[in-house]
């Protein structure tokens, strides 16, 4: 059983930054971040392959950066120029493809962008 543990969420003002981390109990690829806002479906934010290839949702391109440290089995999501519409629960995911989620999910971490 692969376990994923997220950290780094919180409350930030519009235009601010946050960095999420996800520690994984085993090396699994690809890794990804998804988010779910109230009343909306869960959506892909970004994914990263074992070799560092990335895929981003159009809504976050140029603002978010996904990265991974294979030695630590950790994936990161650096979020800049945050907007109120980025408010959601962010979930770490593993074992899917670069475009679809796999079966392993973290517990989620809340990101709230508000003044």
Image (cartoon, rainbow, N blue to C red):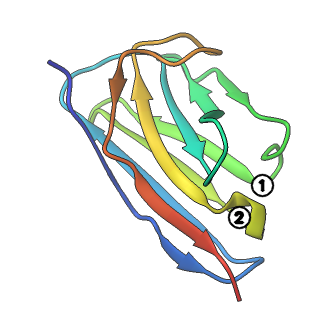
Q: Position of residue 59 (x, y in %)?
A: 83, 44
Tell me, yes or no, if residue 81 can be seen here: no
For this orientation, the residue located farthest to the top is 97
Q: Residue at x 64, y 59 (%)?
A: 79
Q: Is residue 62 above or below residue 43?
A: below
Q: Secondary structure at mark 2?
A: loop
Find the distance from the CA under tag 1 to the CA under tag 2: 5 Å
Compared across the picture, whether 26 is left or right of 114 comes to left
For this orientation, the residue located farthest to the left is 1
Q: Position of residue 21 (x, y in %)?
A: 39, 51
Compared across the picture, whether 52 is left or right of 113 comes to left
Q: Residue at x 51, y 61 (%)?
A: 19
The quadrant of the rendering that contains the N terminus is top left
Near-viewer residue (60 or 48): 60
The quadrant of the rendering that contains the C terminus is bottom right
Q: Residue at x 67, y 43 (%)?
A: 40
Q: Residues within 10 Å of mark 1 (few under 14, many from 20)?
A: few
Tell me, yes or no, if residue 4 can be seen here: yes
Q: Residue at x 45, y 65 (%)?
A: 9
Image quarter of residue 105? top left
Compared across the picture, whether 59 is left or right of 111 comes to right
Tell me which label, 1 or 2, sits earlier in the chain: 1
Q: Position of residue 12 (x, y in %)?
A: 60, 80
Q: How many labels sit on residues?
A: 2
Q: Which residue is mark 2?
A: 80
Near-viewer residue (53 or 79): 79
Q: Is residue 98 above or below residue 113?
A: above
Q: Residues within 10 Å of mark 2 (few under 14, many from 20)?
A: some
Question: CB of mark 1 within 8 Å of CB of mark 2?
Answer: yes
Q: Which residue is mark 1?
A: 63
Q: Is residue 6 above or below residue 10?
A: above
């Amino acid at each position: 059983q692969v376990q994923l543990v997220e950290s780094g969420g919180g409350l930030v003002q519009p235009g601010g930054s946050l960095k999420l981390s996800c520690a994984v109990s085993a090396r699994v690829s690809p890794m990804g971040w998804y988010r779910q806002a109230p009343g909306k479906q869960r959506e892909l934010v970004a994914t990263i392959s074992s070799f560092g290839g990335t895929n981003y949702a159009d809504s976050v391109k140029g603002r978010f950066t996904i990265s991974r440290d294979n030695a630590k089995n950790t994936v990161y999501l650096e979020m800049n120029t945050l907007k109120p519409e980025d408010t959601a629960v962010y979930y770490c995911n593993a074992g899917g493809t670069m475009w679809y989620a796999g079966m392993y999910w973290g517990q989620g971490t809340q990101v709230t962008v508000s003044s």
